Every structure is written in C-alpha cells, then in structure tokens.
Amino acid sequence: MLRYVIGRLLGAIPTLFLIITFSFFLIRIAPGGPFDLERPLEAKVMENLSRIYHLNEPLWAQYLLYLKSVAALDFGPSFYFRDFSINELFAESLPISMQLGLSALCLALVVGGTLGVIAALRQNQTTDYTVMAAATLGVTIPNFVVAPVLTLILGVWLGWLPVGGWNNGAFVNVVLPVVTLALPQVAVVARLTRGSMIEALRSNHVRTARAYGLSAYLVIVVHALRGAILPVVSYLGPAAAALLTGSVVVETIFGIPGIGRYFVQGALNRDYTLVMGTVVVVACFVILFNLIVDLLYALLDPRVRFD
C-alpha cells in the first residue's frame, strides 16, 4: 500500500508540471496585462513595476523563475493586492472555502445517500418518482439561480438568515451558502446511490445474505450499501476537490472571502500569480482526492488490492 501511494505521488509530479506549464503560458497569451488601466500609468512607473515583477524579462525566464518559486512553495506576490503575497491570501481564504466545502460535502452525502437508498427500496413507487424528480430538478437548476431565490425567501421575505457576509463563520451566515453548494451534490449523490443500490440489491451475495435469514438492516447497510457506495466514492473525488477549494458563484453572491472570489478577481485583473496559485492548489486537491478515492476502493471492495 505504501509503495502504491508513493508511486502515485511521484507519478503526479509530471501531471502537475504540465498543468503549471499550460496555465502559465495560456494566461499570458490572453490580451491585457496586470497593469493595463483605463488611465495608462506613466512610462517610468510601468518600467519600475515591470522590473519589480520580472515582466521585463523574456517569457522563458519568467517561467523558470515561477517554477523555482513554486518548488519552494512560494506562489509569489499578488499583482493586484500589492500589499499581500499569494501565500498570505490563501492562508486567509482557503480555510474558509474548505469549511464551506466540507460542510456541503457532508450534507450531500448524508441527505443524498439517504434519499438514494429510500428511492431504491421503493423502486417504481411514488417515493421513488418523487425523489428522482427532485434530484433532476436539483441537477438542472444552477447555483446562480438557487442562491438568489434562497436569499430572497429566507433572508429578505422571512428574515430568518442573513443574506451575506462571513461573520467569522457564524452558523446563521453559513447556512445559505452551504445549502446552495450542497443541493446539486445531493441530487447527484441520490441518483448515483439509487442506481447502484438497485443493482446491489439484486446481486448474488445479497440474495445469499437474505437466504441466511439476516435482518433487513444487515442486508441493506452491511452488504448492499457497501458495494453500492463505490460509484458515489468515484464521483466524490473531483467533487470534493471542487467544493473544498471554493465555489466562484456562491462565494461571490454571498460575499464570502474564499478562494473562489480571489480566482475571479485575479482573472478579471490579470493577476497572473493569483490565478496560477489557484490553479496549482485546485490541481493538488484533485490529485490528492483521486488518490484517497482509490484507497477507499480497497477498503470497500475486497477484490481491489494494491501490491
């Protein structure tokens, strides 16, 4: 197992290198620059800024400098937030995005998994149709529609919850963004769990467990659900990485100072280092969570072994 983990981590280095390379050159191909303003800066000021941020050097030299700094876990200074480095911005914003994402992920697993199991046990009944209709609705309605609707109903009309702000992670401020983030994931998890649960309930080992007279709880939870959850685990790899590194739409609408908002601001202002830092962090999370998913497969499915 340890050899497999080390091999996967070493194998991720070329992937991360390619991601950094493509992102570095693509963002610089885009028109505009970090210091292009409606009122152009004086030539001397532009010269000094270009020298400070190494923009006066050839592109290949900038690329090598960035690789060197990333290897030292230093994402460099921000071009837009000039009093902060990218590491400082991430140290403040990433824990907020991770708290939101983890809360939304747990909510999606509990609610979506429960609904999926109930729908599978009531296949082709009213409960099944209701759950699947709600799941389809949850998948099709985007976050930028759900968020304003929830804000209008629960925040403005009823006045139960604040419509925005972080307030140091107070529960009332977290409810609306977490629910908005979780709703599409609840729908997807419910659909995946239902389909795999139906297949698992018809499998030979579940029929054998029933023939031995095991209780319905043991048959469903211990035998059927263990195999049915594998597709959900596969989906949760990239989903968890996306949720834990911030949602651009949700954080922008609710005014939450997470990493998603910084990514938008960095892209709009051509803040090269901020965009690159976000890309690298997201890529690392995707690689890490895909590795965790593979390890969970070995725990859930006895047929999977890593030698």
Image (cartoon, helix red, strand yellow):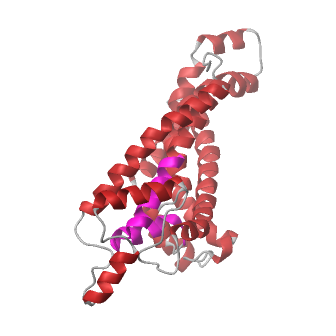
Q: Is residue 109 left or right of residue 139?
A: right
* Residue 100 falls within the magenta-colored stretch: no
Q: Could you tell me which residue is drawn at 36 percent across and 67 percent down?
A: 267
* Residue 278 falls within the magenta-colored stretch: yes
Give the image location of residue 277, x and y in percent. Answer: 47, 60
Q: Could you tell me which residue is drawn at 59 percent across and 48 percent down?
A: 108
Give the image location of residue 183, x and y in percent. Answer: 52, 54
Along the line of sight, the residue nearer the viewer: 1 or 161: 1
* Quarter-of-image position of residue 5: top right
Give the image location of residue 121, x and y in percent. Answer: 60, 29
The C terminus sits in image quarter: top right
Q: Relative to 201, does residue 147 appear above or below in the rendering?
A: below
* Quarter-of-image position of residue 302: top right
Q: Relative to 19, does residue 75 appear above or below in the rendering?
A: below
Q: Could you tell me which residue is drawn at 40 percent across and 72 percent down?
A: 265
Q: Which residues are magenta?
A: 257-285
